[in-house]
Amino acid sequence: MAELSARVGALAQRGVVPGLAFIRVGEDAASKVYVGRKEKACAELGLRSETTVLPQDTTEPQLLGILDRLNAREDIHGILVQAPLPRHMSESRVYSHVLPGKDVDGFHPQNVGKLMLGDATGFRPCTPAGIMELLARTGIRTEGAEVVVLGRGNIVGKPMTAMLCQKGRWANATVTLCHSATREIAAHCRRADILVAAMGVPLFVKASMVKPGAAVLDVGVNRVADPSSSTGTRLVGDVDFQAVQQVAGYLTPNPGGVGPMTIAMLLQNTVQAAEQAAERKASVPEPPLPS
């Protein structure tokens, strides 16, 4: 965030304030919380954000029309459509409707393609990008490391696998992607120098599944019953934290570990989008004066 603050300051000297638009459809409680945290982070960093809240029965064409207007606005550099969307909407159509240059979630097919090709001009999905930063800044060696990713989702599992196996200083790993049809998942996990849990199964990873000294990154966010809580529930990750911390060399807390990095990467993508837009505008020649 401190590094981003300097970049935001440099943009301000050019008269540019990065703008991020949020769209939330319906009244999903978790979505309200997530968008609120992102709005707060924008304010702290000096980004301008605006949120559009739509009713649950909004049609897909209506949502696409709002995206068209945001795509056309020069003061909006990033657009985020908060998941989940209502069942009557196609996530792939909605995410593909955001201009690639404003797709700060990294979900547009063009940005997904750039990720697979190792093209840094695209936007990387925020959660796996945050995990890469955690590994790099902690000094955890990825080159030649055995990595196991639990979960093959489009938001974390697949892009995480792609990032870790790219050529690069903080990549070059040997990656095994496990999912619900994988045989003997525990045996795969025990080989991992780095284990990324993104299955959405509460407390799935036990101490017996973790190689001593391994780095374990817990992405899952699951709500489970807890009679002692005022709400009757509590949030837990995919990793049994209390047990695994006795074995792992590194372990992210959950909540409070990967989540804040996800938000930081969203802001980084938005700042990058504003920088790219400013460069494109600067490269357009001024029209000739009338004779």
Image (cartoon, rainbow, N blue to C red):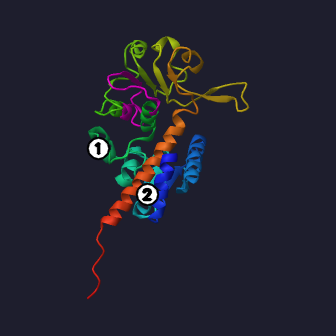
Q: Is residue 18 visible?
A: no
Relative side of 186 to 172, left or right: right
Q: Nearer the viewer, mark 2 or mark 1?
A: 1
Q: Residue at x 44, y 53 (%)?
A: 271
Q: Mark 2, residues whose alpha carbon is within 10 Å: few (<14), some, or many (≥20)?
A: many
Which residue in the protein does label 2 denote?
A: 77
| Residue under pointer 1 | 119
Q: Quadrant of residue 149?
A: top left
Point out residue 278 in the picture as x, y percentages from the top left corner: 38, 61
- Which three-letter amino acid code belongs to the residue tagged 1? Asp
Q: Relative to the observer, which residue lies in front, 200 or 169?
A: 169
Dot 2 or dot 1, earlier in sequence: 2
Look at the image and say whether residue 142 sits in the magenta stretch.
yes
Q: Is the residue 266 above or below the residue 291 in the image?
A: above
- Tell me where the magenta segment starts and ends, as one range: 137-160
Residue 52 lies left or right of residue 150; in this view the side is right
Q: Residue at 71%, 28% (x, y): give it.
A: 229
Residue drawn at x 37%, y 26% as measured from the top left: 142
Verify whether residue 102 appears in magenta.
no
Q: Is residue 88 above or below residue 144?
A: below
Q: Quadrant of residue 147?
A: top left
At numbered mark 1, what does the secondary structure look like: helix, strand or loop?
A: loop
Number of residues whose C-alpha sits closer than 10 Å to that of mark 1, classed few (under 14), some (14–19) or many (20 or more): few
Return the x and y of residue 204 as percentages of the image width and height.
Answer: 51, 19
Mark 2 residue type: His
Q: How far is mark 2 from mark 1, CA to CA?
A: 20 Å
The image shows residue 273 at horizontal and vertical percentages of: 40, 54
